[in-house]
């Protein structure tokens, strides 16, 4: 079959067969089909879309382009959690140990941060010595032993996605539902877990800016998961303001440690408990979500969840003394309050701008080769819906460079809206797709 004919076919809005989709993905992964032809096909898909069968075949072809982990030797129902990204999202650091302490195996592959969204692996490397590159054998052994392991994504896990995403990124074809679905779900299915819980973030700091597009993506991913015989659910969570109070690697790790010790921000814990209750139900340990949530709350209150976190950090080579004494984390040189310019209620703290402000301080990457400054970031003092007086701190900027701090403060001021009119705190759980 000729690639020219397949491009023409999709350009006219016709269906690509299973065989044709596998031919395209295998040919591109192997270097037999050039970038310029795949670019043309991506643009045709962008405008004409794919039906649910095509999406499934695309996802499976991408999954089959590399290694598929066999986690069958891990006892119990293996569950993965995936977030579509946001600002202040340290959910995995809190959720994983809670779930593992209850006896549910958490076999998690995570990534690094790029742009204004943080990465779980970067945060875990705040612990000196933490090993984020486990072999498959060590990964499986650790989950069997302590019920939790987190490792970086294998280089040969869905390699077609890596090539396709790089091309989508420079051809303005990133934001198409079929292509997003294939990208996320090919990696999730290759990771070999039995069940998947998706945190689909919605709003200013998220990839999907409105509920309609987020719901479409959630439904698409859940459909693919069901077709692949996985237990799967998607929770739509609000990302119009940063999650929790801390933004930045060390700062978010400290907040996660505090959360595991029972002092977590309400919004962070609401997301953790909603996602976790779904994971526990999938595991079969509990069938009622409200009872599953109670199990999680008890794991935190009893200290079991924090001890599991310490066990996890130590098992992967991290210095657990940092978990037990947060004063060991090196603070930034400057902590500067950003003061309100008027009295009123906070109506907006635009998440993306706060994320970009933290990134401008050195807390994020523009390219994967950039080095992160772990100590910098932002700690909120208020949330949307709170009343604030003129001169009170909206947040605190943690910086190692005063010029960068001034730029970040300017960004934060522009992203914060204060009004005399009263407003509600944000609703965290927007919708659930099961």
Image (spheres, rainbow, N blue to C red):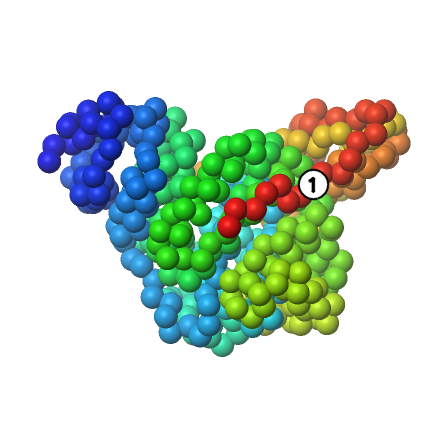
Q: Secondary structure at mark 1?
A: loop
Query: Compared with residue 370, is residue 12 higher up or lower down, i.e. above or below?
Result: above
Position in image of residue 302 (x %, y %):
73, 72
Where 144 sits versus 277, above or below?
Answer: below
Q: Residue at x 70, y 58 (%)?
A: 259
Q: Could one spot residue 133 in this view of the protein?
A: no
277 relative to 41 in the view: left or right? right
> In this orientation, which residue lies closer to the viewer: 40 or 22?
22
- Number of numbered discs: 1
- Would residue 67 appear left or right of 152 to someone viewing this image? left
Q: Is residue 115 left or right of residue 164?
A: right
Q: Residue 227: where, in percent of width, then height?
A: 35, 51
Q: Residue furthest left?
A: 1
Q: Is residue 12 visible?
A: yes
Tell me where residue 83 appears, x and y as whole percent: 52, 47
Give the quadrant of the N terminus: top left
Q: Which residue is at the far front?
A: 288
Sort mark 1 into few (<14), some (14-19) or many (20+) by Cα contacts within 10 Å. few
What residue is at 83 percent from the left and 29 percent from the top? Answer: 422
- The residue that appears at 12% across and 32% down in the rendered structure is 2
Identity of the residue drawn at 52% across and 68% down:
284
Please name whichever residue, 35 or 83, is drawn nearer the observer in this view of the structure. Answer: 83
- Can you identify the residue that label 1 sits on? 427
Q: Position of 366 compared to 203: left or right? A: left
- Residue 316 percent location from the top left of the image: 51, 68
Instruction: Examine the image and state in which quarter residue 160 appears.
Output: top left
């Amino acid at each position: 079959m000729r690639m020219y004919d397949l491009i023409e076919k999709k350009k006219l809005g016709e269906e690509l067969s299973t065989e044709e989709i596998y031919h395209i993905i295998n040919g591109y992964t192997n270097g037999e089909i050039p970038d310029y032809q795949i670019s043309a096909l991506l643009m045709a898909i962008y405008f004409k879309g794919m039906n649910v069968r095509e999406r499934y075949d695309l996802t499976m072809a991408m999954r089959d382009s590399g290694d598929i982990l066999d986690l069958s030797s891990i006892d119990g129902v293996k569950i993965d959690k995936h977030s579509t990204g946001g600002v202040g999202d340290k959910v995995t650091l809190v959720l994983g140990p809670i779930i593992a302490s209850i006896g549910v195996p958490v076999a998690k592959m995570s990534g690094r941060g790029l742009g204004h969204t943080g990465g779980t692996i970067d945060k875990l490397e705040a612990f000196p010595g933490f090993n984020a590159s486990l072999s498959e054998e060590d990964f499986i052994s650790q989950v069997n032993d302590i019920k939790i392991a987190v490792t970086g994504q294998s280089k040969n896990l869905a390699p077609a996605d890596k090539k396709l995403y790089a091309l989508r990124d420079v051809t303005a074809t990133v934001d198409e539902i079929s292509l997003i679905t294939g990208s996320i779900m090919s990696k999730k299915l290759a990771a070999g877990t039995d069940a998947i819980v998706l945190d689909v973030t919605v709003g200013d700091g998220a990839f999907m800016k409105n509920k309609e597009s987020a719901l479409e993506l959630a439904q698409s991913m859940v459909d693919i998961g069901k077709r692949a015989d996985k237990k799967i659910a998607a929770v739509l969570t609000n990302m119009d303001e940063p999650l929790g109070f801390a933004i930045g690697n060390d700062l978010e790790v400290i907040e996660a440690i505090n959360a595991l010790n029972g002092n977590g921000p309400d919004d962070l814990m609401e997301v953790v408990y909603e996602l976790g209750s779904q994971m526990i139900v999938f595991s079969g340990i509990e069938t009622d979500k409200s009872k599953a949530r109670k199990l999680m709350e008890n794991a935190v209150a009893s200290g079991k969840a924090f001890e599991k976190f310490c066990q996890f950090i130590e098992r992967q080579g991290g210095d657990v003394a940092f978990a037990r004494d947060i004063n060991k984390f090196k603070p930034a040189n400057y902590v500067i309050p950003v003061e309100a310019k008027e009295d009123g209620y906070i109506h907006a703290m635009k998440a993306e701008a706060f994320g970009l402000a933290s990134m401008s301080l050195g807390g994020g990457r523009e390219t994967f080769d950039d080095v992160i400054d772990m100590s910098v970031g932002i700690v909120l003092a208020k949330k949307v819906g709170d009343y604030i007086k003129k001169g009170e701190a909206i947040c605190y900027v943690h910086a190692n460079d005063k010029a960068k701090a001034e730029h970040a403060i300017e960004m934060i001021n522009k992203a914060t809206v204060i009004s005399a009119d009263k407003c509600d705190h944000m609703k965290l759980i927007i919708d659930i797709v099961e």
